[in-house]
Image: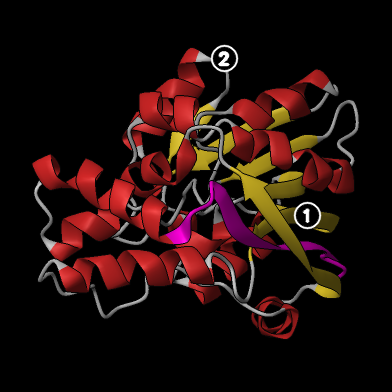
């Protein structure tokens, strides 16, 4: 999902254009392959993809012989996933009502958009069969700090007030473990990974694609967004984003 991006249970700051995401955000599923290997999907398993986005990684799971049900709260991305051949449902992750239906669950670059994190954790736990596993990756503590600060500074310079409410949950391993242990998960292994990521389409395109909702909430007109993206890129003098990922795997044993 995504960056910082994809998105079941999305905060109001997340708005997606499936064409822009496929073009500018193609690096997201590519970098999610390590998390997919951690999941280790097996032939015949039924797997829930939480925040499946446009289905790029769902298809990789299917290629390994598993059956996939994808869920996402973005109508545009669900439409794209279905067009790609993924069985995908338009559902907010916090509202899932699956009951012991899946052998495993997976999520890539999506949980950090889900601010109702306790309900999301409980819904994923409920969806798994006894012995089921949940593996994936999300933005972790310190993720994109430099880039986000640069964008907010540019908004202030131009007279806009950055939103005060957080749009993402970027937890430490301990914070993630606390939420998912409370939901019932055990054997939680969560680790931060610093992963500076070159952006093929540049910082300016990242700003207008991945912070569209943030700019919406700040009241920035469409006509000014490209200019703001260019100014952020100039202030950073790099096309590398300061990503910090939190990779995890856990089990439902009771």
Q: As drawn, is 5 to the left or to the right of 152? A: right
Residue at 81% across / 70% down in the picture?
A: 191
Between the C-alphas of marks 2 and 1, the distance is 23 Å
Residue at 78% across / 54% down in the picture?
A: 135
Q: As drawn, is 140 to the left or to the right of 201? A: right
In the depicted view, which residue is nearer to us: 213 or 241?
A: 241
> Hey, which quadrant is residue 49 in on the image?
top right
Magenta-drawn stretch, dominant element (helix, strand or loop): strand
Question: Which residues are the magenta region?
Answer: 236-254
> Hey, which quadrant is residue 153 in on the image?
bottom left
Label at residue 85: 2
Label at residue 135: 1
- Is 95 located above or below residue 181 in the figure? above
Q: As drawn, is 9 to the left or to the right of 193? A: left
Would you say residue 243 sits in the magenta stretch?
Answer: yes
- Can residue 212 be seen? no
- Is 68 located above or below residue 10 in the figure? above
Residue at 68% across / 23% down in the picture?
A: 59
Which quadrant, please, contains the C terminus?
A: bottom right
Identify the image's colour scheme: rainbow, by chain, secondary structure or one colour: secondary structure
Dot placed on the residue nearer the N-terminal end, 2 or 1: 2
> Hey, which quadrant is residue 91 in on the image?
top left
Q: Residues within 10 Å of mark 1 (few under 14, many from 20)?
A: many
In the depicted view, which residue is nearer to us: 201 or 211?
A: 201
| Callout 2: SS | loop
Residue 30 horizontal/vertical position (percent): 70, 33
Residue 207 horizontal/vertical position (percent): 36, 49
């Amino acid at each position: 999902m995504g960056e910082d991006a994809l998105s079941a249970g999305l905060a109001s700051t997340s708005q997606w254009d499936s064409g822009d995401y496929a073009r500018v955000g193609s690096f997201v599923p590519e970098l999610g392959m390590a998390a997919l290997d951690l999941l280790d999907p097996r032939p015949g398993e039924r797997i829930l993809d939480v925040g499946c986005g446009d289905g790029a990684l769902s298809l990789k799971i299917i290629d390994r012989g598993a059956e996939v049900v994808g869920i996402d709260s973005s109508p545009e991305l669900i439409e794209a996933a279905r067009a790609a051949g993924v069985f995908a449902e338009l559902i907010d992750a916090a509202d899932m009502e699956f009951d012991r239906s899946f052998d495993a669950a997976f999520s890539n670059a999506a949980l950090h958009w889900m601010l109702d994190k306790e309900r999301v954790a409980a819904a994923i736990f409920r969806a798994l069969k006894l012995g089921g596993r949940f593996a994936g990756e999300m933005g972790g503590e310190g993720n994109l700090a430099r880039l986000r600060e640069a964008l907010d500074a540019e908004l202030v310079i131009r007279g806009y007030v950055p939103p005060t409410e957080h749009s993402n949950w970027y937890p430490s391993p301990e914070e993630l473990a606390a939420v998912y242990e409370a939901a019932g998960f055990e054997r939680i292994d969560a680790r931060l990974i610093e992963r500076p990521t070159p952006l093929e389409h540049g910082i300016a395109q990242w700003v207008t694609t991945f912070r569209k909702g943030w700019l919406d909430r700040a009241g920035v007109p469409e006509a000014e967004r490209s200019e703001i993206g260019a100014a952020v890129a100039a202030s950073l003098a790099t096309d590398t984003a300061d990503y910090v990922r939190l990779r995890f795997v856990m089990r439902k044993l009771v």
